[in-house]
Image (spheres, rainbow, N blue to C red):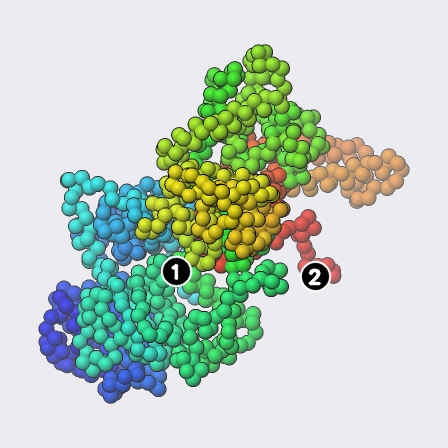
Amino acid sequence: MVICLPGECTDSAACDATCKSKGYQGGVCVFISVDAKSGDCCCKTKNFESHDDSSISDATNTVNLYIHRLGSCRLVVACLVREGTKPPKKTKIDLIDRYLRMDPKSPEFIMDPPLHSLGFVFEELSATRVSGRLTVTEKCCQPFKVLHGGVSALIAEGVASLGAGIASGYKRVAGIHLSIHHIRPAALGDSVFAESFPVSVGKNIQVWEVRLWKTKKTEEQDKKVMVSTSRVTLYCGVPIPDHVKDAPEQVKKFVSKFFSNSDVDGLSFFFSHTLDWSVAAMPNFSVNVPQLSALYSIKTPKAKMNLCADQVFDGMLLCGDMSTKLRFASSSPPVLMAGLPDPRKSNQRRSLRMNKCRAAGADGGRVTVGDDVFSVTTSSKYEVDYLGQSTKGDLNLKLDPLQSFENGQATLEGPIEEVARTEAQAAENLIRELGIQGPFSAQHSPRGIFCSRTLNLRSISAIGYDMDYTLMHYNVMAWEGRAYDYCMENLKTMGFPVDGLSFDPELVIRGLMIDKEKGNLVKADRFGYVKRAMHGTKMLSNKAVSEIYGRELVDLRNQSRWEFLNTFFSVSEALAYAQMVDRLDDGCISADLGTLDYKGLYKAVAKALFRAHVEGQLKSEIMSKPELFVEPDPELPLALLDQKEAGKKLLLITNSDYHYTNKMMKHSFNKFLPNDMDWRDLFDMVIVSARKPEFFQMSHPLYEVVTGEGLMRPCFKAETGGLYSGGSAQMVESSLNVHGDEILYVGDHIYTDVSVSKVHLRWRTALICRELEEEYMALIGSRGHREELIELINQKEVVGDLFNQLRLALQRRSKGRPAQTLAATNLDDQELTETMQKLLIVMQRLDDKIGLMLETDGELFNKRWGFLSRAGLWDKSHLMRQIEKYADIYTSRVSNFLNYTPFMYFRSQEQSLAHDSPLPDAAAMEN
């Protein structure tokens, strides 16, 4: 048996003689290594037993080809088993150490000097995956002996840049954005593993995800624990200076040492019939095994390979390198296929262990993967699950599932609790090994999607999106700062004193209300009680808030008095109003403007800002230099691609006009889309100048945009793929034949996008609230402060309870009745009074401390207003109440959908009630 690797072992006869001289001639299960440097062929058995040579000629043998590297050798395993026989246990082929480790001390292997200086060793380099290891040493640590966050960022930038350089064809790349989330510390001495893979590869922009893990020893196994996750955005094609013109060749030389571009690592496959398939990334080697020529042949890259198999081993490990792109050309589909790659979905190895599994053909009870096995629920009428959610889009089995398995009873029968526990644990382990963030992990992340009302994405047929602050996020300082500037210019033209005023977004947050009668900005709790207030730009004390509002409730239905700050667009308006209230109170506003009260002042500010938008000055400036105002999100197009390819109809419904929409969407999307795809290709329908919220409530004339210049013509019926202006939501439902809760609408405006679409149309809704990421991290940072505050409150409660008991005892004594406590009975009136005095002093001091801590609670998010979602220590803010009431799910950005699948079932969390905590157990209740 001879296997030749061109350029490594060129003399077939010599190789054959070497094999025979070592006594391994004719063995069917043979482990062959070829020294990459000397070309010597050193055949070894590796826990395999030889079989009868006659099995080689059997055209129905099972073939398992395994290609691997270890040390400086290329390893090939060919294992054949005659039909009808089971291989001995020793023939089970499992994964060995996967990658060639190189000597980090050798100068030719120093690809990244900064990483090398820290001791980082690359283990894998390819266009689809870069990985390596680092032992945490003193030079990697911060003073508390844990991995420095800057080192994590350096690793992320280094491995992502190298991977992007390879993927771009060895062009020069430059990192333009890095976001990193530190999850857990890695301590001094820990071994840290880094892996990186592309999330999006566009014409000029690439996005790579980098994950850092540490190995944690457990009693059963070594468990990987995630340390940090990063997203690195890189620009490809940066000009190369003359003095480093040879840098690309050096990178190529370095990468070639790993054999990564041409390696197909750990492919195992089986089919029930002969299948011709092309491998785009097959390594350049040939196999010369005359006895096996009837079964398969491997030639050069993009060659044909013929395989024939009819049996699967008990416990066979099937795996596929996800960087290998497979194209199938066959008269009939494969009967069973496992571990083969989806080249767009993932760049990581997947492995499945098939237990007691058998492949069968199309006849004689054979089961095929696809339409013959599964059906999709297409109608949601009267079909709901145990949570009352539509089952539309769910997969169903057409056949008895046990027909797919040999001895399936042993695998699937038994108590469902045990079966589910086993399968769930296996799934969790596989997800963790693949480096995929599971839905439970994503929920505990600043970029999670949070569920207020259970939502089955499988039942959603269409997803509509707003544009501004939804599909694209503006830099608030830049966008709202310019809006503020134009507003001030207009106010100055109107005669208002604006000199010396500047944009300060920290004064205002989303979710506040403007009290136009009193010139205040207020923050209310979920019931509408005012918790904090600011008159002009001066915060009011708790006493002043109580005197002004008492038990008065904020009623947003009274629009003549209250204005709710729904979005970032409200920031500049509220800030300008607060500053002008100060000028009005100081008497700086000229009498020539007439008698102005706070309500009239608000109208003047709103008019000035409205002019800035309507006259087009602001949008013209943004369109001329969008890169100054828009924060890029390379992951966003990929998230929408996943949804579209899952069969969702995507809609863009925006109040912006066509010219602005087209310019901004091109800038934000096209450079991140694959090939020559345009942003319009993502959407089944685009509606500009929609005039929300009226779009959801009534019908407006519909116009079709027919030219690139934005010329329009009247239209009476919308069609898929069209670009329209105006119209109504009812028109969308009719043209797409989807209605009500089959549509999910995603926007950033509580009222215009979320509330109205839910109330009037019963659409499902998602709110985009970018501040959630900052709020999430601020809550984590404030955990210690809040725990201390709660402890003080609990202490006051205990002290206060004793004080009240003694007070009751004193009251009863004064009426001639006995005290209710032994302590009070043993105390005379003087002692009772002194004890109460001491307790009262303690409570007063606690009040002072608690009051100061409450004032600073939430200052990590905003020093004046505290947390976005909370009002006071225990309660939710009015904004959070609106979100829970009208948004089924909410998250910080649309690209967070990429952390989930388009088939995700979002389930709402348990809602706590006042009597929920703490609940005693049954035994305690009986006692």
Within the image, what quadrant is residue 34 found in?
bottom left
Q: Residue at x 62, y 23 (%)?
A: 599
Name the residue located 65 percent from the left edge and 25 percent from the top edge. Answer: 517
617 left or right of 566 in image: left
Q: Amino acid at mark 1?
A: Leu
Cα distance in 3D space between marks 2 and 1: 43 Å
Horizontal and vertical percent for residue 449? 51, 50
Task: Provide the residue designation for mark 2.
Answer: 922
Give the residue at x 64% y 38%: 525
Q: Label 1's element?
A: helix
Label 2 vs 1, first from the N-terminus: 1
Q: Nearer the viewer, mark 2 or mark 1?
A: 1
For label 1, the residue is 434
Dot 1, crowdedness within 10 Å: few (<14), some or many (≥20)? some
* Residue 358 image position (x, y, % from top left): 41, 79
Left or right: where 168 falls relative to 185 = left
Which amino acid is tagged 2? Ala
Percent position of residue 806, x then y: 77, 38
Question: Is residue 106 visible from the viewing direction of this image?
Answer: no
Is the residue 22 above or below the residue 777 in the image? below
